[in-house]
Amino acid sequence: MTVDYSEASKHRKSQAITPSMPKVGPYELGLKRLLDIAVVVISIPFVAPLIAFMALWVMRDGGTAFYRQDRVGRGGKIYQMWKLRTMVVDADKALGAYLATCPEAAAEWQLTQKLKKDPRITKVGLFLRKSSLDELPQLWNVLIGDMSLVGPRPMMPDQKDLYPGLAYYEQRPGITGTWQVSERNEGTFADRARFDTEYVANMSFMTDMKLLCATVSVVTKGTGY
Protein backbone atom coordinates (compact mmCIF):
# COMPACT_ATOMS: atom_id res chain seq x y z
CA MET A 1 0.00 0.00 0.00
CA THR A 2 1.31 3.45 -0.92
CA VAL A 3 0.89 5.88 1.93
CA ASP A 4 0.29 9.51 0.97
CA TYR A 5 1.53 11.37 4.02
CA SER A 6 1.31 15.14 4.24
CA GLU A 7 4.53 17.14 4.02
CA ALA A 8 4.36 17.71 7.76
CA SER A 9 4.07 13.99 8.40
CA LYS A 10 7.05 13.28 6.16
CA HIS A 11 9.08 15.86 8.05
CA ARG A 12 8.23 14.17 11.35
CA LYS A 13 8.99 10.64 10.15
CA SER A 14 12.35 10.42 11.87
CA GLN A 15 10.69 11.42 15.16
CA ALA A 16 7.62 9.23 14.77
CA ILE A 17 6.44 7.18 17.71
CA THR A 18 6.21 4.18 15.39
CA PRO A 19 9.51 4.02 13.41
CA SER A 20 8.51 0.73 11.77
CA MET A 21 5.40 -1.40 11.55
CA PRO A 22 5.16 -5.16 12.28
CA LYS A 23 4.65 -7.55 9.40
CA VAL A 24 1.02 -8.07 8.46
CA GLY A 25 -0.71 -11.44 8.56
CA PRO A 26 -3.95 -12.96 7.19
CA TYR A 27 -6.15 -11.04 9.61
CA GLU A 28 -4.78 -7.65 8.60
CA LEU A 29 -4.74 -8.56 4.90
CA GLY A 30 -8.39 -9.57 4.60
CA LEU A 31 -10.08 -11.29 7.52
CA LYS A 32 -10.47 -8.04 9.46
CA ARG A 33 -12.34 -6.52 6.51
CA LEU A 34 -14.58 -9.60 6.23
CA LEU A 35 -15.40 -9.30 9.93
CA ASP A 36 -16.38 -5.66 9.46
CA ILE A 37 -18.74 -6.46 6.59
CA ALA A 38 -20.30 -9.45 8.35
CA VAL A 39 -21.03 -7.56 11.57
CA VAL A 40 -22.56 -4.59 9.71
CA VAL A 41 -24.78 -6.75 7.51
CA ILE A 42 -26.01 -8.81 10.46
CA SER A 43 -26.73 -5.68 12.53
CA ILE A 44 -28.69 -3.76 9.86
CA PRO A 45 -32.18 -5.12 10.77
CA PHE A 46 -31.66 -4.06 14.39
CA VAL A 47 -29.70 -0.84 13.95
CA ALA A 48 -31.60 0.76 11.05
CA PRO A 49 -34.89 1.25 12.96
CA LEU A 50 -32.96 2.64 15.95
CA ILE A 51 -31.14 5.17 13.76
CA ALA A 52 -34.44 6.20 12.14
CA PHE A 53 -36.06 6.79 15.54
CA MET A 54 -33.12 8.84 16.82
CA ALA A 55 -33.00 10.84 13.56
CA LEU A 56 -36.61 11.94 14.10
CA TRP A 57 -35.72 12.89 17.68
CA VAL A 58 -32.75 14.99 16.55
CA MET A 59 -34.82 16.85 13.92
CA ARG A 60 -37.23 18.25 16.51
CA ASP A 61 -35.18 21.47 16.64
CA GLY A 62 -35.70 22.05 12.93
CA GLY A 63 -32.20 21.02 11.84
CA THR A 64 -31.02 18.05 9.85
CA ALA A 65 -30.73 14.60 11.42
CA PHE A 66 -27.30 13.69 10.13
CA TYR A 67 -23.95 15.40 10.10
CA ARG A 68 -21.00 14.59 7.90
CA GLN A 69 -17.49 15.91 8.10
CA ASP A 70 -14.16 15.31 6.42
CA ARG A 71 -11.85 12.87 8.19
CA VAL A 72 -8.40 11.47 7.40
CA GLY A 73 -8.55 7.83 6.35
CA ARG A 74 -6.07 5.08 5.65
CA GLY A 75 -3.00 6.31 3.83
CA GLY A 76 -4.05 9.93 4.33
CA LYS A 77 -7.12 9.67 2.07
CA ILE A 78 -9.90 12.12 2.96
CA TYR A 79 -13.40 10.70 3.40
CA GLN A 80 -16.70 11.94 4.82
CA MET A 81 -17.72 10.46 8.17
CA TRP A 82 -21.41 10.25 9.10
CA LYS A 83 -22.88 10.88 12.54
CA LEU A 84 -26.20 11.82 14.06
CA ARG A 85 -26.16 15.57 14.66
CA THR A 86 -25.46 16.39 18.30
CA MET A 87 -24.76 20.11 17.99
CA VAL A 88 -26.67 23.27 17.21
CA VAL A 89 -27.02 24.47 13.64
CA ASP A 90 -23.86 26.27 12.37
CA ALA A 91 -21.81 24.69 15.16
CA ASP A 92 -18.46 25.52 13.53
CA LYS A 93 -19.24 29.23 13.59
CA ALA A 94 -20.44 28.94 17.18
CA LEU A 95 -17.17 27.28 18.17
CA GLY A 96 -15.06 30.02 16.62
CA ALA A 97 -17.05 32.74 18.40
CA TYR A 98 -16.87 30.91 21.73
CA LEU A 99 -13.12 30.28 21.58
CA ALA A 100 -12.50 33.90 20.62
CA THR A 101 -14.16 35.08 23.83
CA CYS A 102 -12.94 32.37 26.23
CA PRO A 103 -9.14 31.96 26.47
CA GLU A 104 -9.45 29.00 28.86
CA ALA A 105 -11.62 27.10 26.41
CA ALA A 106 -9.28 28.02 23.54
CA ALA A 107 -6.33 26.56 25.47
CA GLU A 108 -8.29 23.39 26.25
CA TRP A 109 -9.26 23.00 22.58
CA GLN A 110 -5.68 23.48 21.43
CA LEU A 111 -4.47 20.76 23.80
CA THR A 112 -7.20 18.12 23.49
CA GLN A 113 -9.27 19.16 20.44
CA LYS A 114 -12.31 18.72 22.71
CA LEU A 115 -14.23 20.75 25.26
CA LYS A 116 -15.54 19.13 28.43
CA LYS A 117 -18.25 21.80 28.59
CA ASP A 118 -19.13 22.40 24.95
CA PRO A 119 -21.90 25.02 24.54
CA ARG A 120 -22.67 23.76 21.02
CA ILE A 121 -24.08 20.42 22.16
CA THR A 122 -27.85 20.09 22.37
CA LYS A 123 -29.68 18.24 25.17
CA VAL A 124 -30.50 15.40 22.78
CA GLY A 125 -26.93 15.48 21.52
CA LEU A 126 -25.54 15.13 25.03
CA PHE A 127 -27.50 11.91 25.52
CA LEU A 128 -26.44 10.56 22.13
CA ARG A 129 -22.79 11.31 22.87
CA LYS A 130 -22.75 9.82 26.34
CA SER A 131 -24.39 6.66 25.01
CA SER A 132 -22.23 6.73 21.83
CA LEU A 133 -25.41 6.25 19.78
CA ASP A 134 -24.45 9.21 17.59
CA GLU A 135 -21.71 6.97 16.12
CA LEU A 136 -24.08 4.36 14.66
CA PRO A 137 -24.34 5.96 11.16
CA GLN A 138 -20.61 5.26 10.82
CA LEU A 139 -21.57 1.66 10.15
CA TRP A 140 -22.19 2.93 6.62
CA ASN A 141 -18.58 4.14 6.49
CA VAL A 142 -17.49 0.68 7.64
CA LEU A 143 -19.61 -1.05 5.00
CA ILE A 144 -18.14 0.97 2.11
CA GLY A 145 -14.58 0.60 3.39
CA ASP A 146 -13.77 4.08 4.70
CA MET A 147 -13.61 2.82 8.28
CA SER A 148 -13.34 -0.32 10.37
CA LEU A 149 -15.22 -1.40 13.48
CA VAL A 150 -11.94 -1.19 15.41
CA GLY A 151 -9.11 1.21 14.64
CA PRO A 152 -7.64 4.65 15.41
CA ARG A 153 -9.97 7.46 16.41
CA PRO A 154 -10.82 9.38 13.16
CA MET A 155 -9.09 12.74 12.97
CA MET A 156 -9.89 15.85 10.96
CA PRO A 157 -7.57 17.10 8.19
CA ASP A 158 -6.53 20.17 10.17
CA GLN A 159 -5.41 17.96 13.06
CA LYS A 160 -2.72 16.10 11.10
CA ASP A 161 0.04 18.45 12.22
CA LEU A 162 -0.87 17.75 15.85
CA TYR A 163 -0.41 14.00 15.44
CA PRO A 164 3.20 12.93 16.23
CA GLY A 165 3.21 9.40 14.80
CA LEU A 166 2.60 7.28 11.71
CA ALA A 167 0.53 4.39 13.08
CA TYR A 168 -2.75 6.18 12.30
CA TYR A 169 -2.12 6.09 8.56
CA GLU A 170 -1.55 2.32 8.49
CA GLN A 171 -5.14 1.39 9.38
CA ARG A 172 -8.70 2.37 8.61
CA PRO A 173 -10.04 4.65 11.36
CA GLY A 174 -12.35 2.82 13.75
CA ILE A 175 -15.74 3.41 15.31
CA THR A 176 -14.07 2.14 18.45
CA GLY A 177 -10.49 1.36 19.41
CA THR A 178 -7.82 1.45 22.08
CA TRP A 179 -8.09 5.20 22.68
CA GLN A 180 -11.88 5.24 22.53
CA VAL A 181 -12.21 2.77 25.43
CA SER A 182 -9.31 4.12 27.50
CA GLU A 183 -8.92 7.86 28.03
CA ARG A 184 -11.78 9.24 26.02
CA ASN A 185 -12.07 12.45 28.02
CA GLU A 186 -8.59 12.78 29.45
CA GLY A 187 -5.14 12.91 27.78
CA THR A 188 -4.00 15.19 24.97
CA PHE A 189 -4.70 14.81 21.27
CA ALA A 190 -1.08 13.77 20.72
CA ASP A 191 -1.57 10.87 23.16
CA ARG A 192 -3.66 9.18 20.50
CA ALA A 193 -0.47 8.20 18.69
CA ARG A 194 0.55 6.08 21.67
CA PHE A 195 -2.74 4.20 21.62
CA ASP A 196 -2.60 3.77 17.84
CA THR A 197 0.93 2.39 18.07
CA GLU A 198 -0.16 -0.10 20.71
CA TYR A 199 -3.09 -1.23 18.58
CA VAL A 200 -1.08 -1.71 15.40
CA ALA A 201 1.59 -3.67 17.27
CA ASN A 202 -0.96 -6.03 18.85
CA MET A 203 -3.63 -6.24 16.17
CA SER A 204 -5.40 -9.60 15.96
CA PHE A 205 -8.89 -11.07 15.93
CA MET A 206 -8.78 -11.50 19.71
CA THR A 207 -7.59 -7.92 20.22
CA ASP A 208 -10.51 -6.61 18.20
CA MET A 209 -12.97 -8.83 20.07
CA LYS A 210 -11.67 -7.55 23.42
CA LEU A 211 -11.97 -3.94 22.27
CA LEU A 212 -15.51 -4.49 20.99
CA CYS A 213 -16.47 -6.02 24.34
CA ALA A 214 -14.83 -3.10 26.16
CA THR A 215 -16.87 -0.75 23.99
CA VAL A 216 -20.08 -2.34 25.22
CA SER A 217 -18.95 -1.53 28.77
CA VAL A 218 -18.20 2.09 27.83
CA VAL A 219 -21.61 2.49 26.20
CA THR A 220 -23.39 0.87 29.14
CA LYS A 221 -21.65 3.16 31.64
CA GLY A 222 -22.34 6.23 29.49
CA THR A 223 -18.75 7.42 29.60
CA GLY A 224 -18.68 8.69 26.02
CA TYR A 225 -18.30 12.33 24.99
Image (spheres, rainbow, N blue to C red):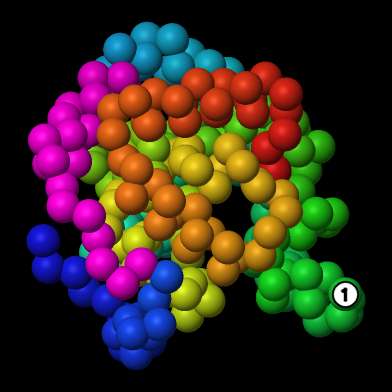
Please provide the residue range marked out in magenta: 18-40
Question: Mark 1 Cα within 10 Å, few/some/many (few <14, many 20+)?
Answer: few
Q: Nearer the viewer, residue 195 or 123?
A: 195
Q: Nearer the viewer, residue 225 or 217?
A: 217
Q: In this view, does 46 lie above or below 5?
A: above
Left or right: 6 in relation to 3: right
The reply to whether the magenta stretch includes residue 26 is: yes
Name which residue type carries label 1.
Glu
**Residue at x-position 45% and y-position 17%:** 47
Image quadrant in which you'd find residue 97:
bottom right
Q: Is residue 16 above or below residue 127?
A: below
Image quadrant in which you'd find residue 95:
bottom right
Mark 1: secondary structure: helix
The reply to whether the magenta stretch includes residue 72 is: no
Give the x, y percent position of residue 58. 66, 33
**Residue at x-position 39% and y-position 76%:** 16
Q: Mark 1 points at which residue?
A: 104
Give the x, y percent position of residue 213. 50, 21
**Residue at x-position 81% and y-position 37%:** 123
